[in-house]
Image (spheres, coloured by chain):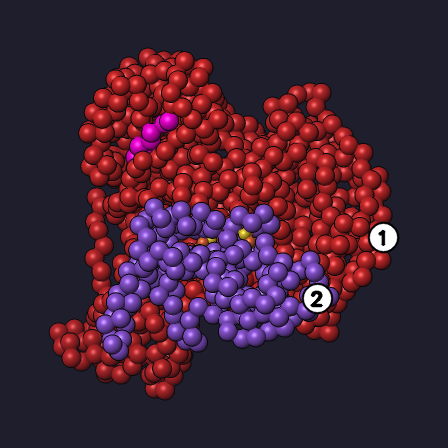
Amino acid sequence: MESVALVVNGVARTVEVEPRRLLVQLIREDLGLTGTHVGCDTSQCGACTVHMDGVAVKSCTVLAVQADGSSVTTIEGMAPEGGLHPLQAAFWEKHGLQCGFCTPGMIMTAADLLASDTDPDDDAIRHALEGNFCRCTGYHNIVAAIREAANKMQVGAATSAEGAPR
Amino acid sequence: MATEMQRQTTPEVGGMGHSVKRKEDPRFIRGAGQFIDDLVLPGMLWLDIVRSPYAHATIKSIDASEALKVPGVAAVITGADLEKAGLHWMPTLAGDKQMVLPTHTVMYQSQEVAAVVATSRYAAADGVAAVMVDYEPLEVVVDPHKALLPDAPVLRPDRAADKQNNHIWHWESGDRAAADAGLAAAEHRISEDIYIPRIHVASIETCGCVADWDAIRGQMTLHMTSQAPHVIRTVLALVSGLPEQNIRVKTHDIGGGFGGKVPVYPGYVLAVVASLTTGKPVKWIEDRSENLQADSFARDYHIHAEMGATNAGKITSLKVSTIADHGYTDAAADPSKFPAGLFNVITGSYDFPNAFVEVDGVYTNKPPGGVAYRCSFRVTEAVHAIERMVDILAHDLDIDPAKIRMDNFIQPEQMPYKTPTGWEYDSGDYPRALKLAMDMIGYDDLRKEQAEKRARGELMGIGISSFTEIVGAGPSHDFDIIGLKMFDSCEIRVHPTGKVLARIGVQTQGQGHETTFAQIIAEELGFPVADIKIEYGDTDTAPYGLGTYASRSTPVAGAATAMAARKIKEKARHLAAHLLEANPDDLVWTNGKWSVKGSPDRSKTIQEIAFAAYTNHPQGMEPGLEAVDYYDPPNLTFPFGSYICVVDIDKGTGQVTVRRFVAVDDCGNIINPMIVDGQIHGGLTMGFAPSLLESMTYDENGNNLAGTFMDYLLPTAVETPAWELGKTTTPSPHHPIGAKGVGESATVGAPPAIANAVVDALWHLGVRNIDIPLTPQKIWAILREKGVTA
Ligand code: FES
Ligand code: FES
């Protein structure tokens, strides 16, 4: 057994794991954060996407021991209790989900995109999603939701910049 | 004629026609859904499955001794163990039978051979790796045509003495003599072989369950990914002998179904057996590769079609014979009378007198086939055949494909229309939908652009599909699954404070029933959607229903919901009469209240009436305000649409790019436009997928060549086009709210639009037909053969 110390959604955790254990199982089974899903066994579907030290990773393709010392954010950590991240709100508003199984991974991937490109066009959004499968929505409203969130976040950033003390 | 529905309710109430935001979304966007693999019960064990590397082999021995030494392994279950309890075979929903675990012979690659039960996911997998199985390979039959040859090995010796061959059944519909005569007399005759490949629904959540046997209470709770939980409960009662009241099937949230979660897979049964034998809850969750290699498949239809017409392009006759590859068992979920599903809707949107269709089901060494892929019982196959044939006819006769459709359409005034294969179309305005699609895409300009491009040697194609769907199974005189009539149900309880709990017999796998069924009740009774909770997927509480597939939720359970609401409305009228001291016949219903005719301020809201039902009901009337309805539909519903697709083909690579895709759908009255659009987007993408990417192929040894997502290509956001949607509204005359269902129309309608566009781009080179998927390899080879270079 190996000891893995990491910060998940802002909380420090230490977990004893077999060296072969995957990060996704540490998140889902050891920590009970079941919003991160598993949809494949070949690193294709993106349902397991989380942020590790601020970067989107497929947690089915990371060993739990590799996450030792890192800071991980899952879908459950995207907004304070009861609140919604602009991406979560936009997925709801724009009907960017149906069965909801791909949704956490989609939102985590989209958040990674918006962190580096605050104003992506549809083409950039579609390319950013190339590692995330959705079988229900045909991606159409997912793209619309991400664009909507980008717009809202830009407005939000502009407003808070105006209100900032000089 | 079509009359469009006007919205009757305010946005706050949110009845029919409002794009109400989904009530289920707050949990999903937060990652707080409850999917099957999220469920953990105290003391739970894990089940994993040993699978066959061979497509056809004798099992000489299974040695579990090493597996039983693996730390954490609690048990290994083999076919021999199941045989003792008579559980090694189980019935399929199509009336065939299927192995739970084999006792002698494996019939397809990745078939379940043994199950390992252990204290963790990893221990179970270690146990699987340690089970030693000795196989002796047998001759493999992959091609269904070869399976029918007299010297082919008999794959199912368990069948009756007069069925010692690989032919499962023969089914036919229509008038053979009339179709033959029509063809013989035709001025122009075409004939084509069209293959629709084996494909897999690949919902992003795989299948799984947690079986939880409580020996003290004699209670089996089966948490599972099922589109039809009540049917599962009844089948489980019949197979296991457990009393049906002590079996509870619960579905929780399901991550997509599309038909793949209708059948009963061996894994479910093994988890039940393992829980019964260990006395612990047992979880089974498939890996994606297991899901792709072993779960039931769709399509695999080898179609031969002949069409006769006048030289002016008027269709006179259609004759179709088909070989249906069902794998080693017919595990389709088709209604009993329809082993080839509703394939005889193959006359499509066109008015002609003579048609005959026959299908022969065949066994091969492949996993069970014949389930749907977002399609109501073989309708996609039918639509593909007729829409390809009409297009070939148009090109052959040098008539524009839009014109030939307009010239042959069943006209709106002919509705209801009786087809030569026996269906009665409820309503439709086909010319209007095609006209709208042509206007939206700018059809005439596209044809001009195409002519200019062709002159320059560029490859551009335009394809049309004017499909008719058939959904909402179905009327009890014709429709049952293993004897269970295909009605559906809704139970509504109005609480004293005017809040509503409704339970429905159908299931949701993403369709948004928690929202749309609330909207039906809001429409009928005036309660705001926010005050209505919809429940489903728990057989202990929901009324009996046949489940969600074949786009039947809205046509059947949606009707039941409206009818149950109307029963409540009627009781409310009598309560209101009592409260208003008026004659019930003098009351009128508007906007959620009963008022006295002529004096609108003398009225009672539905909320006031609900309170009175529990606090102040008239003597002699039953207190309470509840109703249940079991709806047996009088007919199916027939959604339709016209799709137009524009493709460009790269001469250098053979790559097809869908430049534009306009989809005009008519699904009758619409409950929630936002959800309908979402269903169409998703459906179009699942039509696009097998047209260009997906296909499950096997080599001659029965090895699956696309058994992971590395090789089975799902479309991503990059390949998927931005869809352009249009609508017409032609209500169903027989449905209480005039709705028809929409979940599968686009999957059914899209493939021929794409295939027609690609052939349209290549027809001048002498190309008549290319079977889907239209991969770059296939197109590139054709271009080279025709002497086209970049
Ligand atoms: S589960 Fe990680 S990519 Fe599919
Ligand atoms: S919403 Fe079902 S897979 Fe994306």
Snapshot quadrant of residue B757: top left
Rendered colour, chain B: red
**Crowdedness near tag 1: few (<14), some (14–19) or many (≥20) residues, C-alpha within 10 Å:** few
Q: What residue occupies the far left of the structure in this picture?
A: B598
The quadrant holding residue B52 is top right
Residue bearing the label numbered 2: A2
Residue lying at the far front in this picture: please name it. Answer: A166
The chain that appears purple in the image is A
Position of B623 with respect to B339 (left or right) is left
**Chain assignment, label 1:** B
Q: What type of secondary structure mainly makes up the magenta span?
A: strand
Tell me the kind of residue under disc 2.
Glu
Residue B287's spot in the image, x, y percent?
Answer: 62, 51
Residue labelled with disc 1: B66
**Is residue B742 shown above or below B19?**
above
Question: Which mark is drawn over residue B158?
Answer: none
Which chain hosts label 2?
A
- Point out residue B514 in the picture as x, y percentages from the top left corner: 41, 64
- Where ligand 2 lies, by quadrant? bottom left
Q: Is residue B649 magenta?
A: yes
Nearer to us in this view, A157 or B138: A157
Secondary structure at numbered mark 1:
helix
**Residue at the spot x=50%, y=37% of the render?**
B694
Say whether residue B226 is left or right of residue B624.
right
